[in-house]
Image: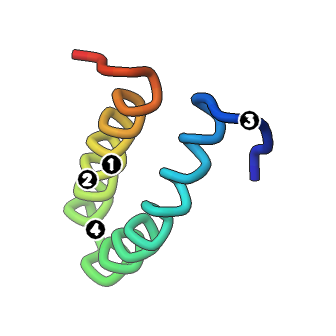
Amino acid sequence: MLRGGAGPHRLFSTEYVKYESIFKEVIHLSKGQGGYAGGFALIVVLFILLVVVGAGAFGGGY
């Protein structure tokens, strides 16, 4: 994982650890669904989490 003092990198690493289980669950579910629906759901969830984590890491956003 990333090392360093307080800052965006450390915040992102802690956020990643928190969301890692969610990522694994979504991947598991998308494999279970199969086809385009599972892949599309995975992309949507990853995009939403990326926006949320990015906004938190960089102090706001939209």
Depth check, front residue: 32 or 62: 62
Residue 43 circle label: 1
Amino acid of disc 4: Gly
Q: Residue at x 25, y 78 (%)?
A: 33
Relative vertical location of residue 6 with respect to residue 13 in this rendering, above or below: above
State if disc 1 and disc 4 touch (CB < 8 Å): no
Residue 51: name its quadrant: top left
Q: Is residue 42 above or below residue 25?
A: above
**Direction from residue 15 to residue 5 in the image, left or right:** right
Q: Quadrant of residue 36?
A: bottom left
Amino acid type, residue under disc 3 in the picture:
Gly
Residue extending farthest to the front is 6
Name the spot of residue 32 as percent of width and height, x first. Answer: 31, 83
Local secondary structure at mark 2: helix
Residue at 62 percent of width and 29 percent of height: 7
Cβ–Cβ under 8 Å for marks 1 and 2: yes
Residue 17 in the image: state x and y as whole percent: 55, 61
The secondary element bearing badge 3 is classed as loop
Disc 2: CA contacts within 10 A as few (<14), some (14-19) or many (>=20)? few
- Quote the CA–CA distance across marks 3 and 1: 31 Å
Mark 3, other Cα within 10 Å: few <14 / some 14–19 / many ≥20: few
Q: Secondary structure at mark 1?
A: helix
Residue projecting furthest to the bottom: 32
Q: Which residue is mark 2?
A: 40
Which label sits in the foreground, 3 or 2? 3
Q: Amino acid at mark 2?
A: Phe
Q: Quadrant of residue 58?
A: top left
In x, y percent, where is residue 38? 26, 66
Q: Secondary structure at mark 4?
A: helix
Residue hosting label 4: 35
